[in-house]
Image (cartoon, helix red, strand yellow):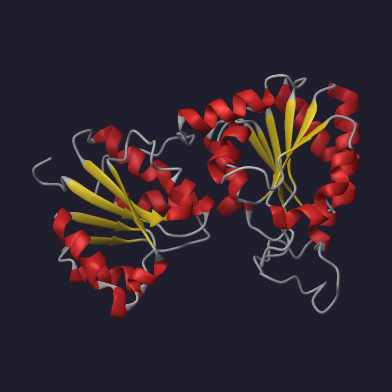
């Protein structure tokens, strides 16, 4: 290890799914070089997914305002005091690069986004340039607190299995082409209830409730919409038997927790953010315009429609077929 960095800082401040997709990067380093000290800089929202990770020595929680030039001095001093040998900057905007430079960290590996690789591999290749002997794992791992897992266990213990999660939220997300219509969720729920006699678990934020409350009328359902913390929600996912979701942070949490998962894809490219792991499948629309990766769908722009036609075109029966395979 004398020729390589002994103490490194990994940076990713972005969305939950992005942070989850970086985990194979630092995990590969720790596996090959167990004596290396790894710190991870992220925002408070994502920190709960790293604080219990055995491969992370310290989580550096920051507010994005700390990167503003006039307010950056305390953060610079915090980083300088750690004497990092290397930064694996997976959020390489000017602000993060500047703060690391001011902190005197001489070596920075800068992530370069490409749609030619899956995000997990894309992040990994950033570190591979320096740690040439590391290997990319075929699956992800995610560690939650015992408190969160106990909460999920108590909430789900008495419910008939299989427990199938409908992560149907994100309807008011700035990105369209990720959410499946509520009427199709209802159709899907009734079919799965007939086939498996289990329980449909509903997850989502309070903002989703006004759209998703019709799903609470399904024959066997337990709703956690707006009722859990982020980590509790992840623990609920981890304690269930299968997840069905549009492309989202919770979907990637499920795959990292090795929960069999069916990802529904419209505008987002499967090659980039498809489900990652052995017990999951990605179903995509058959429309010729996908994956467009647009924030706003050109077909519903300027209308009151909230569901993109690519997501509406995904066949319920195709989902059912894949659920049957995964539950076997």
- Image quarter hosting the N terminus: top left
Residue 316 showing in the rendered view: no
Residue 225 place in picture, x, y as percent:
72, 45
Q: Quadrant of residue 236?
A: top right
Q: Is residue 70 visible?
A: yes
What is the quadrant of residue 159 in the picture? top right
- In the image: residue 282, left or right of residue 54: right
x and y percentages locating residue 176 in the rendered image: 72, 64
At x 85% / y 51%, what residue is drawn? Answer: 182
Q: Picture coordinates of residue 304 (x, y %)?
A: 86, 72
Which residue lies most toward the left here? 2
- Counting from the top left corner in percent of width and height, residue 326 is at 70, 27
How many numbered marks does the figure carry?
0
Report whether 57 appears left or right of 190: left
Q: Nearer the viewer, residue 250 or 315?
A: 250
Q: Residue at position x 49%, y 30% from top? A: 147
Q: Nearer the viewer, residue 231 or 89?
A: 231
Horizontally, residue 146 falls left or right of residue 252, namely: left
Look at the picture and state if 280 lies above or below 328: below
Residue name at image x 29 percent, y 33 percent? 31
Question: Which quadrant: the C terminus?
Answer: top right
Vertical side of 286 occupied by 165: above or below: above
Q: Relative to residue 278, is residue 304 depicted above or below?
A: below
Q: Residue at x 81, y 65 (%)?
A: 306
């Amino acid at each position: 290890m004398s020729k390589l960095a002994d103490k490194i800082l990994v940076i990713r401040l972005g969305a939950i799914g992005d942070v989850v997709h970086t985990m194979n990067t630092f995990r590969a380093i720790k596996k090959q070089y167990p004596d290396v000290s790894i710190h991870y800089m992220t925002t408070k929202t994502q920190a709960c997914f790293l604080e219990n990770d055995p491969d992370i020595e310290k989580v550096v929680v920051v507010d994005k305002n700390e990167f503003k030039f006039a307010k950056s001095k305390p953060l610079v001093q915090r980083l300088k005091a750690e004497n990092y040998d290397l930064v694996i900057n997976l959020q390489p905007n000017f602000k993060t690069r500047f703060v690391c430079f001011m902190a005197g960290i001489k070596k920075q590996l800068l992530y370069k986004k490409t749609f030619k690789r899956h995000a997990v591999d894309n992040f990994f290749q950033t570190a591979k340039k320096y740690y040439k002997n590391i290997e990319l794992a075929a699956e992800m791992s995610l560690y939650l607190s015992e408190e969160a897992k106990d909460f999920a266990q108590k909430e789900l213990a008495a419910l008939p299995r299989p427990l199938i999660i409908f992560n149907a939220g994100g309807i008011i997300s700035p990105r369209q082409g990720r959410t499946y219509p509520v009427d199709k969720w209802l159709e899907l729920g009734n079919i799965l209830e007939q086939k498996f006699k289990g329980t449909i678990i509903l997850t989502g934020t309070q903002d989703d409730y006004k759209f998703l409350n019709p799903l609470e009328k399904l024959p066997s359902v337990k709703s956690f919409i707006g009722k859990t913390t982020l980590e509790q929600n992840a623990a609920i996912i981890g304690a269930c038997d299968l997840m069905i979701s549009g492309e989202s942070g919770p979907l990637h949490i499920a795959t990292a927790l090795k929960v069999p998962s069916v990802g529904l894809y419209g505008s987002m490219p499967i090659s980039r953010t498809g489900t990652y792991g052995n017990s999951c499948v990605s179903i995509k629309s058959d429309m010729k315009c996908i994956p467009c990766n647009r924030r706003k769908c050109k077909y519903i722009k300027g209308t009151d429609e909230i569901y993109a036609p690519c997501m509406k075109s995904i066949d319920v029966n195709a989902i059912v077929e894949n659920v049957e395979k995964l539950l076997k």
